[in-house]
Amino acid sequence: MEEYLHYISIIKRRWLPTSIVFLTLVALSVIKTVTETPIYQAGGQLVLKKNSTSSLTGVGNQLGQLESSVSGRPLGTEVAVLSSIPLAERTINTLGLNMNPLVFLQDLKVKNIENTDILEIFYTDEEPGKAASVVNTLMKIYIENDIEANRAQTKSARDFIAQQLPARKAALQAAERRLQLFKQQNRVLDLTAEASSSVSILTALDKQVADTRSDLSSQTARMQSIQKIFGVTSQDAVLSGFVGESPSTTEVLGQLQNLQQRIAVTGLRLTDTHPTMIDLKKEEIILREELKERIEQSFIGKAGRLNQVKNPENIVQLRTLGLQQGLLGQFASVEAERLSLQVRLKSLADVIESYRQRANTLPQLELQQRQLEREIAASESSYRSLLGRYEELQVAENLQVSNARVVTPALIPGVPVRSRQYINLLQGFIGGIVLGVATAFVLERLDKTIKTPKSAKDLLGYALLGYIPPFPNGAFTPEVIVRKQPDSHISEAFRMLQTNLRFFNSEQSIKVIVVSSAVPKEGKSTVAANLAFSISQLGRNVLLVDADFRNPSQHKIWEISNEVGLSNILKSQIDVEQAVTEITPGLEVMTAGESSNNPGALLDSSQMAVFVAQVAQKYDFVIIDTPPVTVAADATILGKLVNGILFVVRPGVVDSTSISLSKEMLEKADQNVLGIAMNGINANQQYSAYASSTV
């Protein structure tokens, strides 16, 4: 908010040049509006939509369709085409106009009616007939251009598709060959059906394996029970069964059994060394060998098994133990069944492994088949699409279709366009405001003077004692307004100044002060005069001394003589009583007196110190008006002799450089600056309100 107020204050300060620039531009726009030639405007309308011929025939129904532009504005592309230089040149050449296309486009306006497919074309010109001809010709050329563009687009598309068809067909055939080769190499008919049947077959095989294992366990248990009963191996039992079926073997076995009985009986009578026993045992050995030969003859090709039978007599014992009664056949049958089940179990395991290996390859084969089928589908779809498109384009190329149709042709306007007059006035008004404000800111930028009290206070850094509003008779008119208008808000401001001067310096007794400023024209003398009169109204005895020998002004303000004054006193020509003039009871003024060639020497003399001490004793308050600080060193010289300096600042007159220089000089001279009096500032409007209430 503060920034906006700052801008407003700048415009207020520069109101005069701002107003001049604004009124000048407005006046120029009025003159232009009054003096310019009447302008006529003709307009026509085009409707743009998908061509009906393509929609009815179904051929080329996507050719030349209108779409929204990238920016999202409906028909924005067509607006740009109508406003393009090529169409402008064709229109100019058709009508035989002698003008530049860019100039032509400046008077052409194309816009889209919101939420419709209609474009409005306007052209302005000094000749009404020419304006109408331009619009109608432009619409005609646009339609012809649209037809040519559609045909060119169709031909280009057809040529491109003709080039692509052989490649698409070859790609389709290659994909079909790859699928055929894949099926042949991997024996693939229907992978989905094969996967389903594989699951069923593996389930059935697993069931058969389970059943076979159960039967094998049962037969093994039967075999083990028979072995446990007879204490023989399954091989011996099987061999005994086969031996029992051979008559020759059975005969030898019978002889061997009889001989063994004889040996047992004879052994009861005779010893083993007896010849009869020896002959019997030899005969036993011979029978054993013969039994072994008969067994070998019964099991041709099974010698390996016979070698494992260490005692052939066991075969005979097995048969005598009752196996010949059916048990031996059962034992052999059990063993044969068990061996058959083992062979079957191994065969089933091999078959299951084969099916599982095939089943594991099915997903990969199915993936490869789907990829090949997708390639075929994509190639076939692309080929069929291009083939159908090619046939459509052959027909569509011969169609004379356009997406545009004239809705309203341009008529010759009979009334000039008046809107341009208002545009001129509006341009002048807006341009005047913009240029006027710009002028204000440029002048403000070029002006180096202090603009605001805050800026001056920030640069000086001294206490602000009061604001003095501008005088009504002029910015720089010196007068004692406190005397003429004691109840005005300006008088109240001076009373506030003398109060603050006393309040802000309450620690020291102030009797003699110097009033100065940075540069001339800041109103220091006027401030000194009004302050002196204001203090005298409080009943105090005040002396106002004009120590500005270079440009004295107090005698002009009070309208008194300047024949004698301070310079005469310092030259010891007269006394103080002879140099003062009483203005009112309590207020006396001492003018500068005769001019001097070296005023600095007079002010820096011992007589000046004596004079200050003398008037300090005689008067309650002494105000000394001195030259500006940047003009002469008088203020710094006298500042050493008095209680302090009242520094007057007038924004708009003093610049920042002078302010900074003044502060530097005062600080180097070690001056006691009592505070700042801001002159010519409407600092607080409450002064006015308060003054009005006291009248």
Image (spheres, rainbow, N blue to C red):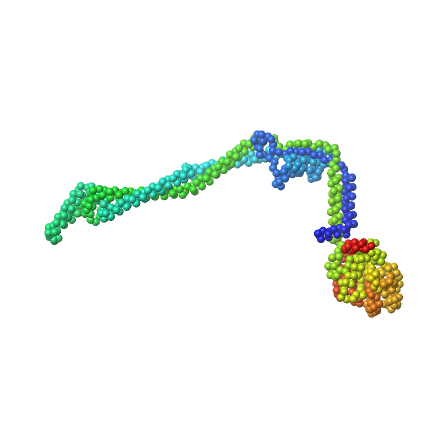
> Percent from the top left, x then y, of residue 351?
35, 42
Q: Is residue 185 left or right of residue 108?
A: left
Residue drawn at x 85%, y 61% is 554
Q: Is residue 410 left or right of residue 545?
A: left
Residue 584: in sight, yes or no?
yes
Quarter occupied by the C terminus: bottom right
Q: In which image quadrant can residue 61 be found?
A: top right
Note whether 301 is above or below 693 in the view shown: above
Q: In which image quadrant can residue 74 be found?
A: top right
Note whether 487 is above or below 189 in the view shown: below
Residue drawn at x 12%, y 49% is 265
Q: In which image quadrant can residue 549 be found?
A: bottom right
> Percent from the top left, x then y, of residue 608?
83, 68
Residue sitting nearer the eye, 654 or 147 = 654
Residue 521: in sight, yes or no?
no
Note whether 347 is above or below 515 in the view shown: above
> Percent from the top left, x then y, of residue 109?
69, 37
Residue sitting nearer the eye, 188 or 555 = 555
> Percent from the top left, x then y, of residue 448?
75, 56
Report how many numbered discs are placed on residues in the image: 0
Q: Is residue 491 left or right of residue 131?
A: right
